[in-house]
Image: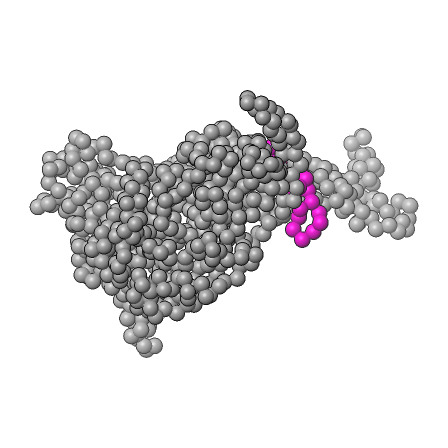
Amino acid sequence: MIRRVLPHGLGRGLLTRKPGTRRGGFSLDWDGKVSEIKKKIKSILPGRSCDLLQDTSHLPPEHSDVVIVGGGVLGLSVAYWLKKLESRRGAIRVLVVERDHTYSQASTGLSVGGICQQFSLPENIQLSLFSASFLRNINEYLAVVDAPPLDLRFSPSGYLLLASEKDAAAMESNVKVQRQVGAKISLMSPDQLRNKFPWINTEGVALASYGMEDEGWFDPWCLLQGLRRKVQSLGVLFCQGEVTRFVSSSQRMLTTDDKAVVLKRIHKVHVKMDCSLEYQPVECAIVVNAAGAWSAQIAALAGIGEGPPGTLQGTKLPVEPRKRYVYVWHCPQGPGLETPLVADTSGAYFRREGLGSNYLGGRSPTEQEEPDPANLEVDHDFFQDKVWPHLALRIPAFETLKVQSAWASYYDYNTFDQNGVVGPHPLVANMYFATGFSGHGLQQAPGVGRAVAEMILKGRFQTIDLSPFLFTRFYLGEKIQENNII
Amino acid sequence: MWDLVLEDRRINSLRLVAPMWNGRIRGIHRLGGAVAPEGNQKKKRTILQLLTNYFYDVEALRDYLLQREMYKVHEKNRSFTWLEKQHGPYGAGAFFILKQGGAVKFRDKEWIRPDKYGHFSQEFWNFCVVPVEAVDASDCDINYEGLDNLLLLKELQSLSLQRCSHVDDWCLSRLYPLADSLQELSLAGCPRVSERGLACLHHLRNLRRLDISDLPAVSNPGLTQILVEEMLPNCEVVGVDWAEGLKSGPEEQPQDTASPVPA
């Protein structure tokens, strides 16, 4: 009985009656209200963020375990290895803060993308070998379901380094180290060089070293996009903004020989949103400084270097932006398809670009002629005066070249010893560095990212021991320099 | 008003329940994936693709399947260098190629080729002191790691890597240890070989014949062939007939398009 009554009397009536018709002529916009309330209730339901007061979806999250400052190839590589090495999926929350999502000034995109193993420090050679194997299997490391495979456009043409009489002994000992670590490098006399590459003028060359495997150049943009895609699929959060402030606590402590030091710990990172005054404090456990050429500013924000000079507190991060030019020229009579990247005794270098007799190269300026790094304008006189004479001397065909275009990029130049800074800061205990690679950051990024991730997760370097690259060397004055020719 | 909300909640509760079913779905698909023949796989892929957009578990499953495919290739290319101690480098190299489904020719002997089931006679172990002079690894799954085994064959004169889908530019940069002996190399139809890899064939100075026809990854086949010819002056380079497209006038074109069909 009740069952029969319900649908006719109560049930049907309640369902069909419109709320506005009850009192007759109720003139509020019910449809709009309903959808608004619906939206609010939806936002409380699990699986969605609550935005009862205002929409905050464009802001970074309030908490993140790791905040990576800098979304270039080094920062993304740290993010990738953190997610890869975490104990279970989704164990750590990683936020990457990048100032410019177009990467217009980032060193990654403007790099010439070379990879070589011809260093003198075993750590650098190991890093480079690791990166080569990463790049070789890039479609396995960075595989994303339903995404097309990456085309790295790797040219395995090798590096050819030339040494004068003075540098020949250094080159020989370097090659010895390189071979011990596992790089396939061959040494060539000037005669052999002339046989193999008849377009080289061997005047003033005493010895040449030539990389046979895993050396060449690739498309840095492809690596960046591949890492970005993979990291996003692993659940890393991205945010376009700038880090303006670190909220930290400090603690005065005594060392074993009774010196007072101030230990700091970062608790919050203030991320200022792009093109607005809005900012979001992100509570975090660890900050990774991978801001490349601008990493010294980030370090200074965290209070690194604020102290009397000569102490650990007063030791600044010695990384600054330096401007480097890359020129592209056309030369129909130039060397052919077999051309490797040639680095001359003078420091000038060039390589083939594509098939149409185009070449690309440049030279590192000396300390005195260092250009002003305020903008990315190209100084064309530098090519005429400092680069071309050396190139034309080495490759006679380049007498008649025609410069087609040029660009400039920043190096995250380490003024102390031109090598990277990896691992935690001794006093600001939860800031980790992955910066200062002075031009070879791109080719070492996969290895460095892994090392930093291991340091964060396991507390020590496991795959490659990068302890010579720790920050403390700036205080102790232990330079680890490459006695290299490039 | 409230019925709308209720409706919403119902939908939401459905979404919450769905992942629990996945346990079963995954089981079914994993079994199916293992047994299903090649034809069915394509259809299932699309269903899986659709489900990937809705369920994390399906995505994880597809990720796993992808990983397994990669693992298979690695497994096929594992190093056989441990055989070198017992059977010498030629035995180990030949065993690897035969295992892959390719053919080997020892010096002054007949070609040894596995049958369609992948079986091959074991008598080649007797020739292990004789160097291998030719390898035909067409349609094999050789990749960079597998080359370890191939590079054991120091006196290899002819190497055919036709239509090898895992041979890429990195592999070509690794052929230089064979430079003293290698005279003939065929890379026809390798989908991942580009002009960047061909550029490092200049190490192979004894090369007499090089086949670089039908390489889809090469951007300018004609120009590339000319540059390769310049780089290897003593070598006959077989590639696309780059002049072919230039000669055919508009009246000959129908003939051209018709000819590949019967062939």
Which quadrant of the view contains residue B245?
bottom left
Q: Is residue A261 above or below residue B62?
A: above
State which region is magenta.
A269-288
- Left or right: where A162 falls relative to A450: left
User: Viewer-proximal residue, A160 or B37?
Assistant: A160
Q: Residue furthest top?
A: A256
Residue at left offset 17%, top offset 49%: B180
- Give the percent coordinates (x, y) of residue A355: 35, 63
The verdict on residue B111 being magenta is no
User: Viewer-proximal residue, A263 or B52?
Assistant: A263
- Report if residue A228 is visible in the image: no
- Report if residue B153 is visible in the image: yes
User: Viewer-proximal residue, B124 or A396?
Assistant: A396
- Left or right: where B248 falls relative to A245: left
The coloring applied to the image is: one colour
Residue at left offset 80%, top offset 30%: A1
- Left or right: where A84 falls relative to A342: right
> What is the number of callouts on the image?
0
- Give the percent coordinates (x, y) of residue B172: 28, 50
Residue at left offset 48%, top offset 34%: A476
The verdict on residue A285 being magenta is yes
Q: Main secondary structure of the magenta part?
A: strand
- Give the percent coordinates (x, y) of residue B85: 18, 31
Residue at left offset 63%, top offset 48%: A241
- Give the percent coordinates (x, y) of residue B181: 16, 49
Q: Residue furthest left?
A: B108
